[in-house]
């Protein structure tokens, strides 16, 4: 019996390991679909339009905003990013669970609009380790890393209103915890009550 698709919203400061954890989650739950956002930023090498993002012009983005095509949108690092309303509605109706990798502003907008979902914040174990990961990952210039560290402090303040916090210290443990959170969220009474009513005719 089909229930409404679960909306999983994951945010984290850059470098905390969100991409790594999301990849692990989609491997663990192959039916989970990743929402493909719209963005005005340029594709990075290897990124594919329609797979990683829908890469669009700022004019087109603004037009979509005016048409109320986004359920949320935000400016992040000087570029615009948005989640299409249609993506969410489609997942809801088809019963498919959907993963949204969006920043705190977007997540907060969804929460404030009363969108039902599972809101998870991924934290690094320390600022020191965040810096180490940013430096070890990247081709980013040192001033870009500094900006990300400064921004991380503000983002971490937002963690308090999320439903769950996953500290990504040991990767395997964080992956297990995230999977457990998703599994539990699928079995909440709110989600199950309709099925129970049908199963037991009550
Ligand atoms: P984000 O998407 O949050 O910016 P990434 O997933 O790209 O972060 O991870 C940043 C870097 O840290 C990558 O090099 C990744 O391999 C590494 N990383 C992720 N999780 C861990 C972990 N638990 N322990 C050590 N390194 C990690
Ligand atoms: P990147 O450009 O590195 O892929 O993503 C930069 C930031 O934008 C990340 O924090 C990512 O979560 C966020 N982001 C990606 N898509 C969306 C979206 O549709 N809405 C919002 N609000 N943020 C997004």
Image (cartoon, grey):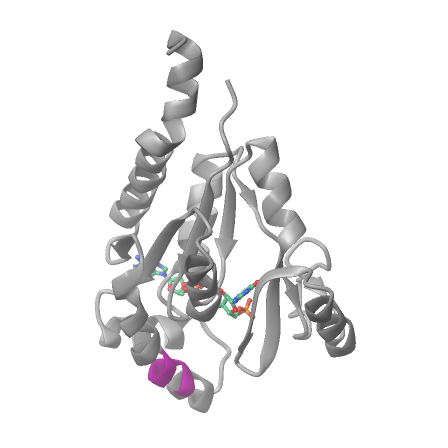
In this view, 122 is above or below 30: below
Q: Residue at x 49, y 66 (%)?
A: 106
Q: Is residue 62 magenta?
A: no
In this view, 4 is above or below 84: above
How many marks are shown on the rendered structure? 0
Q: Is residue 149 magenta?
A: yes
Image x and y of residue 159, in percent? 29, 65
User: Which of the pair 194/80 is nearer the observer?
Assistant: 194
Q: Which residues are magenta?
A: 147-151
Q: Which quadrant holds residue 187?
A: top left
Quarter for ligand 1? bottom left
Q: Residue at x 46, y 51 (%)?
A: 115
Q: Is residue 64 left or right of residue 90?
A: right
Q: Residue at x 43, y 36 (%)?
A: 28
User: Which of the pair 7/128 is nearer the observer?
Assistant: 7
Image x and y of residue 103, in percent? 46, 67
In this view, 155 is above or below 3: below
Q: Which quadrant holds residue 15?
A: bottom left
Image x and y of residue 101, in percent? 49, 57
Q: Residue at x 29, y 38 (%)?
A: 180
Q: Is residue 194 left or right of residue 32?
A: left
């Amino acid at each position: 019996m089909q229930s409404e698709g679960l909306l999983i919203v994951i945010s984290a400061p850059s470098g905390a390991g969100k991409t790594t954890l999301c990849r692990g989650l989609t491997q663990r739950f192959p039916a989970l679909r990743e929402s493909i956002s719209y963005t005005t930023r340029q594709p990075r090498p290897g990124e594919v339009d329609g797979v990683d993002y829908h890469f669009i012009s700022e004019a087109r983005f603004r037009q979509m905003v005016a048409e109320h095509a986004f359920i949320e949108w935000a400016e992040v690092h000087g570029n615009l990013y948005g989640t299409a309303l249609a993506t969410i509605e489609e997942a809801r109706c088809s019963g498919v669970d959907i993963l949204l990798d969006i920043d705190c502003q977007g997540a907060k907008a969804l929460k404030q609009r009363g969108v039902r979902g599972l809101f998870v914040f991924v934290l690094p174990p320390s600022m020191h380790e965040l810096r180490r990961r940013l430096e070890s990952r990247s081709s980013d210039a040192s001033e870009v890393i500094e900006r990300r560290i400064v921004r991380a402090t503000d983002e971490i303040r937002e963690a308090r209103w999320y439903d769950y916090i996953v500290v990504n210290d040991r990767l395997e443990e964080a992956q297990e915890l995230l999977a457990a959170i998703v599994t539990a969220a699928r079995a909440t009474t709110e989600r199950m009550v309709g099925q129970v009513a049908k199963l037991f005719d009550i």
